[in-house]
Amino acid sequence: MKHDIPKSPVIILYLLLCTLLYLPDCYAQKFELDGKRKKYTIGFKTVQNLIIIPIYINGKGPYNFLLDTGVGQMIITDTSFLKHYQLKKFSTIKVQGYGFGESVDAILTRDVNVRMGKATINKIPTAIFTEDVFNLSGYLGVHIYGILGYYFFNSFKVKVNYGKNTITMYRPGIPVKIKGDRIPIEIRNAKPYIQAEIETQEHGKVKLDMLLDNGSSHPMTLEALNQAAFPLPQNHIAANLGVGINGIISGSIARITKLKIGAHSFENVLTGFPAYNKEIAQLEGNNRNGSIGADILRHFTVTFDYENEAIYLKKNHSGKPTFEHDMAGMEIYVVENGVRKYYIGRIEPDSPAEKAGIHPDDEILSVDLKNMTYYDLSGLTELFKSKDGKLTIIEVLRGKEKHFILLRLKRRI
């Protein structure tokens, strides 16, 4: 049985709106808190390190949206939106992405009003895709309707407490005592950029211009250096890093000796190296080196202050952060059709999953003799990168036959 297989959104979200129209006049619009309220706090949930918030659109909802610093216009990815709303003013464009394949259609409109808790914005510029090219719901195991970014972060001082899963928004002009180390950022094309430093065995210390992208679930990606592909560390493995608008984005996974942001440093950082494409830099209009993602930011309470071009980082726990890659070598996705089912997607060559005899399109019936009602997708992902050498029993349905398979996890990078 074949399904549309979602891929990890390591880099897909910041690739998306490079291709859409940049409309500087639109970005003056902002969310506003109701009444005289000075601040407001809303809860969120995280899946694969990504922030999911409930919002209302044109009075209906709530709808699950990803909150992502890596996008400008609001994006609606769930195609059912077009069936339930009568848009009065819109235009249709073709969006050319990265990877291989044809362009896809997107509807641009301002006929959208949004409420997030006690904050509202009217006529927010929005891109609505006519095809669900990312299948974020399948990848995350939660129904995702779209992505919200710049318009929210540019409206307030925004404190994201990853430890408590809360977001606090502060009305502009209200004095706020912000805890944490202040680090300058630069807003370019509606996205925040930060200066960071890495250290590698091959190149020593290298200063970098990095997109700050909490819509990337992984710690870091490195794309370019001196207008060429970022040099790969000697020890690396091939990997699919995500999916663009019309194709798989291939690359490699490796580890960087050290990452330093302000006074904070991380060691042995898992890093994605996407295949280099000059179009990315040309469409983005700058020469960034890569991006810093949510698997770094989640170690802090992060306050975004776009107005004053700064973020504040306050460590939210003690201990040494560690970063692990999938130790099974297989992708898992969800199909919802009245009943939630889990399927195997792509399998990495020479991986533990391939050696164990797991096949693409196998349906997972149980893991360690527990049926799948016991798990969610996030829990499964953590299980399969939990411990080098761990032995797991997986029951799968292949066609009409059931198979019990012993899978021994292996740290591959």
Image: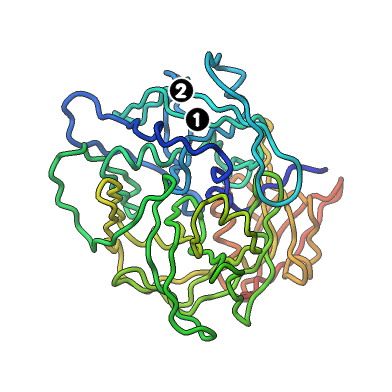
Task: Identify the colour scheme used.
Answer: rainbow
Residue at 19% across, 53% down: 178
Q: Nearer the viewer, residue 102 or 316?
A: 102
Any part of residue 393 in sight: yes
Residue type highlighted by circle 2: Val
Residue at 41% across, 37% down: 24
Residue type highlighted by circle 1: Thr
- Residue identified by numbered label 1: 126
Residue at 15% across, 47% down: 176
| Residue 39 pos. (x, y %) | 21, 37
Q: Nearer the viewer, residue 363 or 96?
A: 96
Residue at 27% across, 39% down: 41
Tell me if 170 is positioned left or right of 55 in this view: left
Alpha carbons under labels 2 and 1: distance apart: 7 Å
Any part of residue 10 in sight: no
| Residue 260 pos. (x, y %) | 37, 73
Dot 2 lies on which element?
loop
Note whether 229 is above or below 283 in the view shown. Answer: below
Tell me if 3 is positioned left or right of 162 in this view: right
Image mark for residue 112: 2
Quick one: which residue is furthest to the right in this view?
A: 400
Q: Nearer the viewer, residue 172 or 45?
A: 172
User: Could you tell me if the residues under marks 2 and 1 are in contact, i.e. CB atoms within 8 Å?
Assistant: yes
